[in-house]
Image (spheres, rainbow, N blue to C red):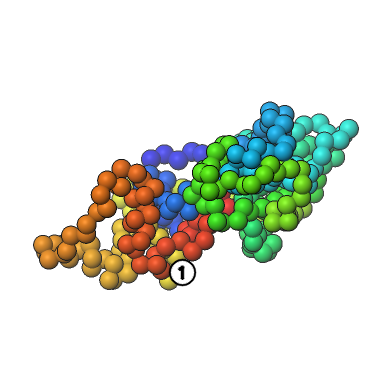
């Protein structure tokens, strides 16, 4: 497979484990997400759509929200409203402002692509804004090393007249509490038991929805460092891709204990827990394995099927919170 276009997701996974990069992007293998992970992804996608609609003045003026809306839908509207009050406001010096803005930059024969949740340009400054639908932001020092933090201001500085020191990147973190995971969001629906008792004022400050911000000021030093890191990473990737064409697999991470046990490719990689692999390889005794009765008729319903399957799994295999347990997939 020829890879010509890369994003921060590619680079993040490449740093995490080159072999996993191979499985996901070169072999295009996928793996099922848990219900909690699907709900978290949908919530993030819904909030991004709401914020984009808000920027385009397409968000219907709903206030108060209808009592029939689910608590999660109401919270999404509250989140969108509260985020709108804290992000940079247009002023007389604003020259450009757009959500979901895409930029490309070619380096070492690869096309780098970034997508800004919001980009605002003034006469003297450029503001990049990114929203995350989870709380507990990582430490600033940790977030500073993430490819998204490095690439977003780098690509803007490399493709515009703004100096690196003119560019600010802000992350805004906000989370809906997890008790509604798996429920519908982003649409005015919900089961009767989910529904709030009364209409909600979306402009009221919700104490449990306080946005949390981490801000980065770019600089010439960062610009040079990111440029250097990118060249090194892309050259290494190109060598691995050339090797892969000759049948040599990309390297596996050496952080085995930390990363492999939870990885969906552990069995494929020969890094699964011995007891787990035994269950798959010892098929000589398949006749001795007891059949598991399935609940009547419920398998037609995917939600019920997953709930039933979860009951059958050991509890320590279940996701512990709403965030994707696979840390290589976070901060997307
Ligand atoms: S099991 Fe380990 S080595 Fe294999 S893809 Fe996953 S993280 Fe990488």
Q: Report which residue position mark 1 lands on.
A: 258
Which image quadrant for residue 318? bottom left
Which percent across, then down, holds residue 92?
A: 89, 32
Q: Residue at x 41, y 68 (%)?
A: 316
- Could you tell me how many numbered marks the image carries? 1
Question: What residue do we see at 68% from left, 31% from top?
Answer: 59
Instruction: Judge whether 228 appears above or below 46 on screen.
Output: below
Crowding around mark 1 (Cα neighbors within 10 Å: few <14, some 14 to 19, many 20+) is few
Above or below residue 91? Residue 323 is below
Q: Is residue 155 above or below residue 140?
A: above
Instruction: Report whether 208 appears left or right of 288.
Output: right
The percent position of residue 60, horizontal first and vertical second, equals 68, 30
The answer to whether residue 128 is left or right of residue 67 is right
Q: Nearer the viewer, residue 311 or 235?
A: 311
With 265 as the anchor, is 284 left or right in this view? Answer: left
Quadrant occupied by the N terminus? top left
- Would residue 131 be visible to someone looking at this image? yes
The quarter of the displayed image where residue 302 is located: top left
Q: Does mark 1 have its CB less than 8 Å from ligand 1?
A: no
Query: Image point 82% across, 36% down: which residue?
Result: 90
Left or right of residue 184: residue 30: left
Closest to the observer, 219 or 128: 128
Q: Quadrant of residue 210?
A: bottom right
Q: Residue furthest front?
A: 197
- Residue 288, horizontal then vertical, whole percent: 12, 66
For label 1, the SS is helix
Nearer to me, 100 or 33:
33
List the single residue furthest toward the right. 92
């Amino acid at each position: 497979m020829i890879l010509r276009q890369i994003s921060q997701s590619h680079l993040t996974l490449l740093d995490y484990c080159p072999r996993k990069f191979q499985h996901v992007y070169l072999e295009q293998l996928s793996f099922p997400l848990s219900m909690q992970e699907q709900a978290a992804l949908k919530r993030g996608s819904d909030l991004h759509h709401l914020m984009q609609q808000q920027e385009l003045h397409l968000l219907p003026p709903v206030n108060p929200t209808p009592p029939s809306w689910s608590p999660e839908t109401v919270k999404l509207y509250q989140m969108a409203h509260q985020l709108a009050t804290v992000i940079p406001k247009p002023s007389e010096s604003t020259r450009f402002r757009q959500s979901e803005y895409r930029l490309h930059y070619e380096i070492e024969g690869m096309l780098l692509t970034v997508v800004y949740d919001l980009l605002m340009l003034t006469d003297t400054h450029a503001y990049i804004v990114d929203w995350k639908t989870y709380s507990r932001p990582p430490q600033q020092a940790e977030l500073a090393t993430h490819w998204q933090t490095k690439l977003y201001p780098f690509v803007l500085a490399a493709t515009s007249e703004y100096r690196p020191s003119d560019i600010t990147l802000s992350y805004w973190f906000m989370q809906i509490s997890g008790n509604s995971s798996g429920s519908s969001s982003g649409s005015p629906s919900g089961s009767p038991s989910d529904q709030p008792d009364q209409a909600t004022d979306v402009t009221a400050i919700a104490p449990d929805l306080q946005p949390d911000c981490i801000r980065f000021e770019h600089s010439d030093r960062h610009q040079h460092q990111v440029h250097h890191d990118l060249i090194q990473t892309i050259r290494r990737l190109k060598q691995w891709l050339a090797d892969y064409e000759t049948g040599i697999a990309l390297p596996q991470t050496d952080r085995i204990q930390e990363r492999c046990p939870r990885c969906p490719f552990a069995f494929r990689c020969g890094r699964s827990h011995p007891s787990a692999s035994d269950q798959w390889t010892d098929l000589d005794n398949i006749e001795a394995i007891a059949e598991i009765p399935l609940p009547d008729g419920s398998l037609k319903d995917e939600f019920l099927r997953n709930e039933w399957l979860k009951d059958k799994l050991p509890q320590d295999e279940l996701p512990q919170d709403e965030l994707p347990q696979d840390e290589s997939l976070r901060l997307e």
